[in-house]
Amino acid sequence: MDRARFERSVAAIDAANAGDPYGKELRDAALATEWVQRLQPDAGEELLLAARAHHLRRWTIPRSSYPDGRNGYLRWRRELQKQHAADVARILASEGYDDATIERVCEIIQKRRLTSDPEVQTFEDALCLVFLETQLGEFAERHADKADDVLAKTLDKMSDEGRALAAGLLEGKAAG
């Protein structure tokens, strides 16, 4: 790994997320990176870059621009993944990454082969853990009727290791 190029890329991703009017994306990018490193201490450059860029400039496609309901939500999420991949591809290309590396980062961000690619599963686990750590409580307050279902669906997407970490997180929140 070219450490200097990696650090420049992370800085560029963070700079792009610094415009977040809600102030969440820098925090969530750092947390996703930390969870990836905890789940996979020897994580490669592509996985770490994907974690950092997982919601790159997310606020630029508002949820309200898609219909209400699950189908609208899923369409919005797919479009976001495409945008995140395109945005990070431009950043990585400007830092001199080769096409194969850029494509791999984009594959991870778009969760291609989730059930068969261990790095994509680690990525998904990290994102779920960030959600559980930072957003589930607020979601449950706003949507008490949906919280149990969302929690179950979140846990279903996770590996056994991810679920074990999630259980620890949830127990800590219940005790705290």
Image (tube, helix red, strand yellow):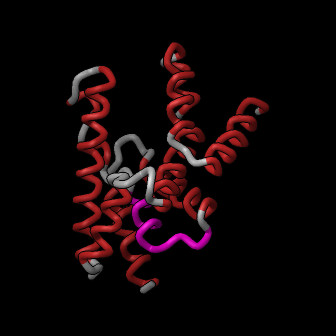
* Image-quadrant location for residue 78: top left
Q: In this view, does 85 lie above or below 76?
A: below
The quadrant holding residue 66 is: top left
User: What secondary structure predominates along the stretch shown in magenta?
Assistant: helix
Q: Position of residue 70 (x, y in %)?
A: 33, 24
Looking at the rendering, the stretch of residues picked out in magenta corresponds to 41-53
> Can residue 18 be seen here?
no
| 149 lies left or right of 76 | right
| Relative to 170, 138 lies left or right | left
- Nearer-the-camera pick, 44 or 174: 44
Is residue 52 covered in magenta? Answer: yes
Q: Which residue is drawn at 38% across and 81% down?
A: 5
Who's the residue at 27% across and 82% down the image? Answer: 96
Rendered view: 92 above or below 121: below
In the rendered structure, the answer to whether residue 168 lies left or right of residue 156 reads right
Q: Is residue 121 above or below residue 139?
A: below
Q: Which residue is depicted at the point 30% across and 33% down?
A: 74
Q: Where residue 86 sits in the image (x, y, percent)?
A: 22, 59
